Image (cartoon, rainbow, N blue to C red):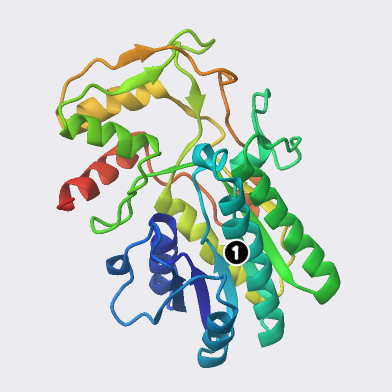
Amino acid sequence: MAWLVTGGAGYIGSHVVRAFLAEGIEVVVLDDLSSGHADFVPAGVPFVEGTLLDTALLAKTFAEHSISGVVHVAGFKYAGVSVSRPLHTYEQNVTATALLLAAMQDAGVGRIVFSSSAAVYGTPFTDLVTEETAKSPESPYGESKLIGEWLLRDQAVAAGLAHTSLRYFNVVGSGSADLRDTSPHNLFPMVFEALIDGRTPRINGNDYKTADGTCVRDYIHVADLAISHVAAARRLDAGLAIAPVYNLGSGEGVSVGEIMSTVAAVTGIPFSPEIGPRRSGDPDRIVASGEMAARDLDWKMRHTLDDMVRSAWESRQASSV
């Protein structure tokens, strides 16, 4: 029996695939390659290229492979862009999830681990975000992830679906030199590309109420996140009690200024970041508690900030693009 990883050719999904394989668990990957890369899928892993919106392809995938559960990572993940493309965002993140759940029900597959997001909280003005913190998404992306959680909840009532949703905070780093974050909207790729192009990275505001004046966010290593997906799948397979949602956060956080200093040290490219105006609505600090995930899902911070930056930089250097 195998686990289907949707979006398994993407940055996060490919790390999840490798984590499953490292534990001897078979996987099948389904990805439309809109933001993923076929060469991120390991040799020998069954790869289905296509969209979750293709119901015939979904039915065929479940019919042809012995799938016991699904890790649903596929989706449109650009929060800022989602504001100008709300219909596309809802189609990719809500409609696609509903169609996936319907295909699972038709195939008799009753376990799913869902890739959710800290974006469901919006801008929480609290020192430590917990799973009970009020949800107030501020973009179609955040709204779509919250609706995804609701779809799982309601399908659990209707059809006995066993499920959990993992709310990621700022996912960075690399677990392998051949896997990297290629998003043009994420901090690490933006900083690296600026340095490679000879430009100076920029910080949005340095007058926050933090130790160095730059905002503090919760950065987690992608390989640590992947391990907790395996733990969640094992818990579902074993029929153990599992919470409907978990935060994957550090409990401490790192400032953007610290990120920049570490990048300069790791890359060997000295720079003083440009300081731009702070963005409206940006809170001083967003940090999440990972206590529940640590209790149930083998969640812990196995990597330092230096590890996160160094692994991400090495994977960027290993790429020819």
Q: Residue furthest bottom?
A: 64
Q: Tell me which corner region of the image, top left, top right, bottom left or bottom right, holds residue 260.
A: top left
Q: Residue at position x 50%, y 49% from top?
A: 77
Residue 138 sits above or below residue 148 on the image: above
Amino acid type of the residue that numbered disc 1 sits on in the rendered structure: Ala
Give the labeled residue for mark 1.
Answer: 232
Q: Residue at position x 54%, y 10% from top?
A: 209
Residue 260 sits above or below residue 119 on the image: above
Q: Position of residue 316 (x, y in %)?
A: 22, 46
Q: Is residue 50 left or right of residue 166?
A: left
Residue 218 sits above or below residue 28 on the image: above
Q: Secondary structure at mark 1?
A: helix
Q: Position of residue 35 (x, y in %)?
A: 39, 57
Q: Is residue 65 left or right of residue 149?
A: left
Residue 216 sits above or below residue 36 on the image: above
Residue 262 visible, this angle: yes
Q: Position of residue 291 (x, y in %)?
A: 64, 44
